[in-house]
Image: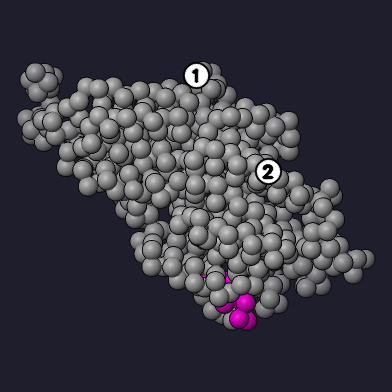
């Protein structure tokens, strides 16, 4: 009946035959499984990814060959930072893709490249074909704007894709969230806020896709009450509470309040454990260790990084541990983790063009090899504004730029160093509340001092010390900054 109706409505015989898949070989022949799947999609749009997981699992229990349900389950685990689980479910969907419709195959294949291989170029190509075949579907545009383009650092393209998704489906909260996430890195805060208001007008304010971008917008406006409101709103909500607590930890550390940051990180870990998010809990501990390393607490950094090495095999957690160990001076273990990333993720775009160049450059610097460090980072140049979309939002952003600036400082190339650290400050919407966003002020001061420009050096140091006016007084890098600034007086 459907095929006859499509012919009567003017669809060509060739496309009717191409997409005329028998029900038993497409989606699912089980009405109960389809009902569970549909309920999961509804819960996803209203409550969020974590809440939708049981429904997609139930759909699979009812039909173990339900390829699209596996794919959506993989996507849900990816949304909450559980990359290992996401890869397992997505791999299963890919194995069953012949039991899916043509439209579903596009979603499954894109998910496979995003989650399993990490090859964002192939994922982008698949989405382009998906859009060509199904121009009225908003989902490929969401994949591009929310997952693929941020890794590639192509935020302008993200704006275009997300805006297109909203035009196709004005009631999809995901599209509003990813449009805001695309505006923020471009420092287009006015348009981000307007998009948020538009989502509220469409009665999407209860969606869990909005608190994180709302928090980030409040941070960029120095709106402490706005940030606190989003944290309070997330309380008790699995998959979102932990991420907001993690962001509070970042914000506290950004202003040097390291003791507060440790407490928020502990709360984030506990929240993730309650939600059975193993990789996310490890990630918050890893990030706590990275902050300790950057701020000069090497022993504490090694403790965090080492304790998490056995708890999570996640790509981002491993990168964070390697980076923390490299900053803490434990080059041997950092090198071992780096070599393992090469073996485990040979096709992964962010590993190949962001993580590995950064780690190799940092390790080369520790050996005093400036030219090798700079050469390693050349690979990252086209992608260095990108960031992970597989774990805590934004935390990997701009490390290639920061390490390049450090390399120039070590080699006394003060002008080049200043330019790199200024790039970080100019991209506040990308670096956000990450520790290197604060440290860039200090490093810029060091570069100007090296150049003999005392006025600019003092201004940069003052910016850092003002930002850290309420910082814990015993943080090693703060003590160094105060001593260096005193010498300029």
Q: Secondary structure at mark 2?
A: helix
Residue 128 within the magenta-colored segment of the rendering = no
Crowd around label 1: few <14 · some 14–19 · many ≥20 (10 Å): few
Q: Position of residue 246 (x, y in %)?
A: 62, 43
Instruction: Report if residue 379 is visible in the image.
Output: no
Part of the protein shown in magenta: 360-368
Q: Which of these two is toward me, 314 or 164? A: 314
Q: Secondary structure at mark 1?
A: loop
Instruction: Report if residue 263 is visible in the image.
Output: yes
Looking at the figure, which quarter contains the C terminus?
Answer: bottom right
Quadrant hosting residue 339: bottom left
> Which residue shows up at 64% across the image and 62% down it?
303
Q: Which residue is mark 2?
A: 264
Label disc, if present, on residue 444 of the rendered structure: none
Crowd around label 2: few <14 · some 14–19 · many ≥20 (10 Å): many
Label disc, if present, on residue 202 of the rendered structure: 1
- Decide: is 380 above or below 331: above
> Which residue shows up at 71% across the image and 45% down it?
263
Tag 2 near tag 1, CB within 8 Å: no
> Which residue shows up at 84% across the image and 63% down it?
479
Closer to the eye: label 2 or 1: 2
Q: Position of residue 114 (x, y in %)?
A: 37, 49
């Amino acid at each position: 009946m459907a095929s006859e109706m499509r012919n009567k409505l003017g669809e060509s015989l060739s496309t009717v035959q191409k997409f005329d898949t028998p029900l038993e070989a497409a989606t699912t022949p089980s009405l109960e499984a389809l009902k569970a799947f549909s309920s999961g999609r509804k819960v996803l749009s209203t409550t969020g990814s974590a809440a939708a997981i049981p429904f997609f699992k139930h759909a699979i229990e009812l039909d173990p060959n339900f390829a699209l349900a596996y794919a959506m389950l993989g996507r849900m685990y990816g949304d909450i930072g559980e990359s290992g689980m996401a890869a397992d479910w997505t791999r299963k969907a890919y194995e069953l893709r012949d039991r899916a419709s043509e439209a579903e195959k596009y979603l499954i294949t894109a998910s496979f490249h995003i989650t399993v291989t990490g090859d964002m170029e192939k994922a982008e190509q698949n989405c382009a074909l998906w859009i060509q075949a199904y121009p009225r579907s908003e989902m490929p545009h969401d994949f591009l704007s929310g997952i693929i383009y941020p890794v590639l650092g192509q935020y302008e393209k993200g704006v275009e894709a997300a805006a297109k998704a909203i035009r196709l489906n004005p009631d999809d909260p995901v599209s509003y969230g990813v449009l805001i996430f695309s505006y923020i890195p471009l420092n287009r805060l006015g348009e981000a806020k307007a998009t948020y208001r538009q989502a509220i007008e469409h009665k999407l304010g209860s969606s869990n896709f909005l608190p994180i971008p709302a928090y980030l917008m409040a941070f960029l406006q120095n709106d402490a009450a706005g940030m606190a409101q989003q944290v309070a709103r997330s309380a008790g909500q699995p998959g979102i509470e932990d991420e907001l607590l993690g962001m509070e930890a970042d914000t506290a550390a950004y202003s040097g309040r390291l003791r507060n940051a440790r407490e928020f990180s502990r709360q984030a870990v506990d929240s993730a454990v309650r939600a059975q998010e193993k990789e996310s809990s490890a990630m918050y501990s890893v990030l706590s260790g990275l902050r300790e390393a950057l701020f000069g607490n090497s022993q504490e950094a090694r403790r965090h990084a080492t304790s998490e090495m056995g708890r999570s095999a996640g790509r981002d957690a491993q990168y964070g541990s390697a980076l923390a160990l490299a900053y803490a001076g434990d080059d041997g273990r950092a090198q071992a983790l780096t070599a393992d990333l090469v073996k485990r993720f040979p096709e992964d775009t962010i590993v190949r063009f962001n993580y590995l160049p950064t780690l190799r450059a940092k390790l080369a610097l520790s050996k005093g090899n400036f030219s090798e460090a700079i050469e390693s980072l050349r690979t990252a140049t086209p992608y260095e504004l990108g960031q992970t979309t597989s774990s805590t939002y934004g935390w990997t952003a701009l490390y290639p730029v920061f390490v390049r600036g450090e390399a120039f400082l070590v080699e006394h190339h003060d002008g080049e160093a200043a330019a790199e650290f200024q790039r970080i400050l100019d991209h506040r919407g990308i670096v956000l509340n990450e520790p290197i966003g604060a440290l860039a002020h200090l490093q810029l001061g060091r570069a100007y001092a090296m150049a003999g420009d005392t006025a600019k050096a003092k201004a940069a140091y003052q910016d850092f010390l003002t930002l850290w006016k309420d910082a814990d007084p015993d943080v090693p890098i703060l003590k160094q900054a105060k001593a260096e600034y005193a010498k300029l007086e």
